[in-house]
Image (cartoon, rainbow, N blue to C red):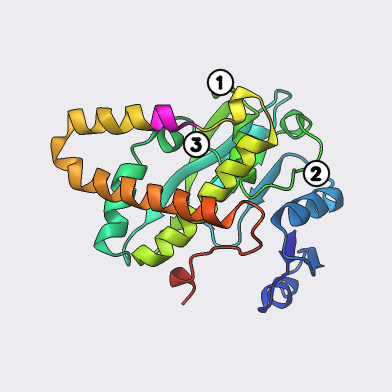
């Protein structure tokens, strides 16, 4: 099923060209609306939620289905891979640090794809109106309820520092929105754990200092811009560098 939300390209038209694909052409550009309408139209479990710009290996979907076809509440995703082949040096420096952080290394589900068992999907009602839907879903499950499955999914990293900053502004807004969504600790910011991970990285590899400096600079600038714009801003910061 393809939920094309507010698309101005040929996404819906192309998707209709494939046999067996159900296309929901949603005029409003809202990811949470697309997720909820897709869920209402879906009838099968387990369910896999996939962003349009993600590439999955051929063995990833069968592996997800096997792991999620259980009575327990489970959330899962394949192993992540970042495509940095066309990225600039500062972007590569950022991701050398990012891939060492707990969010990526400690049972990551999200960043473009995640799957839920039937019991896992029953853990919440509707997707809330949040940008960070993947992080919201991840925080609903304990570490023991998360699974990394066979296969891989590839995220195309931004090519330029400007595009990277746009993406991180969106992430900062999403994190702030999630923290404001609930007073529960599991939805709060993880700044302290990130700080400890950065210090640990520097202790293990002092030569990573320039990379850490790039990471901190991008992160702090993105948070400042997100704070100025406010979570209610309607602009969707996206990475246009990988769409050309």
- Left or right: where 134 falls relative to 36: left
Decide if residue 193 is in sight here: yes
On the image, numbered disc 3 is attached to which residue?
108
206 left or right of 116 in image: left
The mark found on residue 44 in the picture is 2
**Hey, which quadrant is residue 15 in on the image?**
bottom right
Say whether residue 42 is magenta: no
- Extent of the magenta region: 190-194
Element class at badge 3: loop
* Cβ atoms at labels 2 and 1 below 8 Å apart: no
The quadrant the N terminus occupies is: bottom right
Judging from the image, what secondary structure is the residue with disc 1 in? helix
- Does the residue at mark 3 contact the one at mark 1 (Cβ under 8 Å)? no
Q: CA distance from mark 3 to mark 2?
A: 24 Å
Q: Secondary structure at mark 2?
A: loop
Q: Is residue 193 magenta?
A: yes
Spot occupied by residue 234 in the image (x, y as percentages of width and height):
66, 62
**At 65% across and 29% down in the image, what residue appears?**
140
Locate residue 165, reporting x and y percent.
42, 59
Query: Which residue lies at the image location 45% right of the left edge and 45% below the top edge?
Result: 80
- The residue that label 1 is drawn on is 144
Q: Quick one: label 2 or label 1, which is nearer the N terminus?
A: 2
Q: Real-space Cα distance between discs 2 and 1?
A: 24 Å
Q: Position of residue 196 (x, y in %)?
A: 33, 27
In the figure, 232 relative to 124: above or below? below
Viewer-proximal residue, 124 or 23?
A: 124
Q: Quadrant of residue 137?
A: top right
Q: Residue at x 56, y 57 (%)?
A: 229
Q: Nearer the viewer, mark 3 or mark 2?
A: 3
Closer to the camera, 103 or 196? 196
Question: Label 3: few (<14), some or many (≥20) within 10 Å?
Answer: many
Number of the label disc, if any, that sits on residue 123: none
């Amino acid at each position: 099923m393809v939920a094309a939300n507010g698309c101005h390209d040929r996404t819906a038209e192309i998707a209709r060209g494939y046999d067996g694909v159900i296309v929901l052409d949603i005029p409003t550009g809202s990811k949470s609306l697309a997720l909820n309408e897709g869920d209402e139209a879906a009838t099968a479990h387990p369910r896999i939620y996939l962003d349009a710009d993600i590439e999955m290996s051929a063995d990833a979907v069968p592996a997800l289905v096997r792991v999620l076809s259980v009575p327990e509440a489970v959330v899962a995703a394949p192993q992540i891979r970042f495509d940095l082949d066309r990225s600039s040096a500062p972007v590569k420096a950022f991701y050398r640090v990012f891939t060492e952080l707990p969010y990526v290394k400690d049972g990551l589900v999200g960043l473009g794809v995640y799957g839920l068992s039937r019991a896992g999907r029953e853990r919440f009602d509707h997707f809330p109106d949040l940008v960070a839907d993947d992080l919201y879903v991840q925080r609903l499950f304990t570490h023991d309820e998360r699974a990394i499955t066979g296969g891989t999914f590839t995220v195309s990293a931004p090519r330029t520092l400007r595009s990277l900053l746009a993406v991180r502004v969106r992430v900062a807004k999403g994190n702030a929105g999630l923290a404001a969504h609930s007073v529960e600790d599991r939805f709060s910011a993880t700044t302290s754990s990130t700080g400890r991970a950065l210090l640990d990285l520097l202790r293990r590899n002092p030569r990573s200092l320039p990379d850490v400096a790039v990471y901190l600079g991008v992160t702090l600038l993105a948070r400042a811009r997100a704070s100025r714009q406010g979570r209610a801003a309607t602009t969707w910061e996206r990475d246009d560098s990988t769409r050309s």
